Image (cartoon, rainbow, N blue to C red):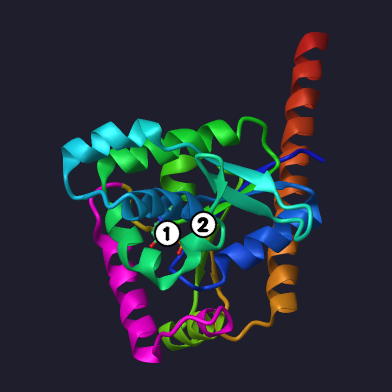
Amino acid sequence: MRKIIIAIDGFSSCGKSTMAKDLAKKLHYRYIDSGAMYRAVTFYFMSNNLDYTNREIVLIELPKIHIEFNLNTESKNSDTYLNGENVEEKIRGMNVSMHVSNVSTIKEVRQAMVALQKKMSKSKAIVMDGRDIGTAVFPDAELKIFMTANPEIRAQRRYKELQAKGEDVTMDEVKQNLAERDHIDSTRKESPLQQADDAIVLDNSHFSKEQQMDFVYNLVMEKKLMEDIQVNQLRFSDEQHDLV
Ligand code: DC
């Protein structure tokens, strides 16, 4: 079967990464967490005490930022590396979450990340999640999914996740952070969070992990089958043409 690109976009904390990661494993595809890239850039500015609101500083610093993903042999997931350092854990905290949406509005940051995302995906067989994957990064992706969930449920999930990591945070802070990020992500000028016209909406508020995977896996199989049929039809019509 042909390999395809799967673009998964949606609001913060609606389980995109977990789903995308599981799907990639099941399909033996590569998974790329584009949010981790914006988080790594944010972490770079914060840990070096750099003012990301100053355009000159951004232009000087951006070329010094090198992001890559390397396989973690223990967890079998790919970890985010910033200039050679594994920052997978450090970029997930509330501190980075509070600034990442603002950093993501910077035009030059977006251009650099989108270029890198396109480069990382030269061969197909990829699942990438984010906010603008189906609209700006891969507008021609064969399968686009737009994920959403009830804001209350998303906040509860995120709160549990942070608690498990031992972060001292209240439910109200989590709710406020999610609402702010949704607002900034959806209203920014440069490739905002938007549902692509040809995306399939997945509201997972009341889905179990298994139900969600079944739903998405069936979509992938349908798409792959359609791709195969189309290629065969093209081949067949070319052959007919040659016979004339
Ligand atoms: O998926 P996440 O919550 O880890 O993403 C962190 C932030 O990065 C999110 O608030 C918006 C930004 N982001 C983006 O602007 N474009 C993407 N493709 C992915 C994430």
40 or 101: nearer the viewer: 40
Separation of residues labelled 1 and 2 (CA atoms): 6 Å
Location of residue 240 (image quadrant): top right
154 or 53: nearer the viewer: 53
Q: Left or right: 49 with respect to 96?
A: left
Q: Is residue 149 visible?
A: yes
Q: Left or right: 36 with respect to 185?
A: right
The residue under label 2 is: 199
Q: Is residue 196 visible?
A: no
Q: Quadrant of ligand 1?
A: bottom left
Location of residue 84 (image quadrant): top right
Q: Left or right: 96 with respect to 89?
A: left
State the quadrant of the N terminus: top right
147 or 182: nearer the viewer: 182
Tell me which segment is drawn in magenta: 162-190
The type of residue carrying mark 1 is Gln
Task: For the residues labelled 1 and 2, say whether their Cβ atoms are less than 8 Å apart.
Answer: yes
The type of residue carrying mark 2 is Ala
